[in-house]
């Protein structure tokens, strides 16, 4: 048997902590609990895509402007780290997803709230310079409207895989009221980027929706213990998340019911010369082209669809529909 004796150089190297590699030792806390979470969760990613797609339609209808609402890369971190990265104030909405245990969190930061309200009121959605330590009643009301839309679409996206009943149990701006798990607990965060869609023309000349520059994020924070009951389905290699024809029809009807259409009743018209307009004074009567017994045209979205007779109903001016204009201009008597 050959004796193995370390050389002085090897002894010196061991005493110095091994060979010099240029790397520093990383401290590790043996008391810290860490979870191994696979970065690939195909079904979970598919659910997020379905949620973003359907929520995008609802937000576009609500804001009356074509919007893009796209899922970004999933982030895995400690909850304390997630909380520290939030801007103040932010709309922190604690969500319960029955029958999953625990709570989740929808976060809408200040800039996103201002962007949504500004776009809803007809603004261009540009950068908004505004600082406040709390949201106004109007902003709070709009946050609830957006949140209700998100919860409805969240339920619809999860239904084919693991049906849940989503509801908001608490809304706050102080992070102390949104500590849904201990700071060291592992959470999964899905950012959804919200932008105004712009018309872009590709090389082929085809037009399509493209995101405008920048964007605003709505964060969905889901603690890992909350999804443990459904993890086998979420980790599945392939899980089709599709709606059948009945569900698609129901979803279409729900979105259609939220659409607003402007209805305009044409009382008549008159042509005046400039001298006649200049001579008008209080009390003058302008004679219109229609008699009081004539039917009035009703235009929906700028197109004549109805006609009827004016009158009063429950103390208010009203119109009784007499004819429905069919395709091709034909009338159907009511």
Image: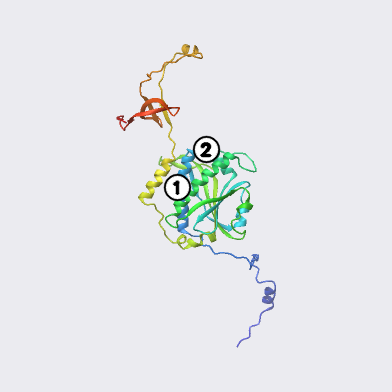
Residue wearing tag 2: 120
Q: Secondary structure at mark 1?
A: helix
| Residue 261 as seen in the image, left or right of residue 195 | left
Q: Pinpoint residue 188: horizontal percent, then vertical percent.
A: 54, 57
| Residue 248 as seen in the image, left or right of residue 7 | left
Residue wearing tag 1: 54
Numbered disc total: 2
Toward the viewer: 241 or 333? 333
241 is higher (above) or lower (below) than 195: below
Residue at image position (37%, 52%) is: 244
Toward the viewer: 289 or 84? 289
Q: Pinpoint residue 69: horizontal percent, then vertical percent.
A: 49, 46
Q: Pinpoint residue 242: horizontal percent, then vertical percent.
A: 39, 53
Q: Are marks 1 and 2 in contact (CB under 8 Å)?
A: no
Q: Is residue 127 visible?
A: no
Toward the viewer: 229 or 234? 229
Q: How packed is label 1: few (under 14 Cα within 10 Å), some, or many (20 or more)?
A: many
Disc number placed over residue 92 in the picture, else none: none
**First along the sequence among labels 1 and 2:** 1
Residue at image position (68%, 77%) is: 11
127 is higher (above) or lower (below) than 234: above
Among the 4 quarters of the image, the one containing residue 320: top left
Q: How packed is label 2: few (under 14 Cα within 10 Å), some, or many (20 or more)?
A: some
Colour scheme in use: rainbow
């Amino acid at each position: 048997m050959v004796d193995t004796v370390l050389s002085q150089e090897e002894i010196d190297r061991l005493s110095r902590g091994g060979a010099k590699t240029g790397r520093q030792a990383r401290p590790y806390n043996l008391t810290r609990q860490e979870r191994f979470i696979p970065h690939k969760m195909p079904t979970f990613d598919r659910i997020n895509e379905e949620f973003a797609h359907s929520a995008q339609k609802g937000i576009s209808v609500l804001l009356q402007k074509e919007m893009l609402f796209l899922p970004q890369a999933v982030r895995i971190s400690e909850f304390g780290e997630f909380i520290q990265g939030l801007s103040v104030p932010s709309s922190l909405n604690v969500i319960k997803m029955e029958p999953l245990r625990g709570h989740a969190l929808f976060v809408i930061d200040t800039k996103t709230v201002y962007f949504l309200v500004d776009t809803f009121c007809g603004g261009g959605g540009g950068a908004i310079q505004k600082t406040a330590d709390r949201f106004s009643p109007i902003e709070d009301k709009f946050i609830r409207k957006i949140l209700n839309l998100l919860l409805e679409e969240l339920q619809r996206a999860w239904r084919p895989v693991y049906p849940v009943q989503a509801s908001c149990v608490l809304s706050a701006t102080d992070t102390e009221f949104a500590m849904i798990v201990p700071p060291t607990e592992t959470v999964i965060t899905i950012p959804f980027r919200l932008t105004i869609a712009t018309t872009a023309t590709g090389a082929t000349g085809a037009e399509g929706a493209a995101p405008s520059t920048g964007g605003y994020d709505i964060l969905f924070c889901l603690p890992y213990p909350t999804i443990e009951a459904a993890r086998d389905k979420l980790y599945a290699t392939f899980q089709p998340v599709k709606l059948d024809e009945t569900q698609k029809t129901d979803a279409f009807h729900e979105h259609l019911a939220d659409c607003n259409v402007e209805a305009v009743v044409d009382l008549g018209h008159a042509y005046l010369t400039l001298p006649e307009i200049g001579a008008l004074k209080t009390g003058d009567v302008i004679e219109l082209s229609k008699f009081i017994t004539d039917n009035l045209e009703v235009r929906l979205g700028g197109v004549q669809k109805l006609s009827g007779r004016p009158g009063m109903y429950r103390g208010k001016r009203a119109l009784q529909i007499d004819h429905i204009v069919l395709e091709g201009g034909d009338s159907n008597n009511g």
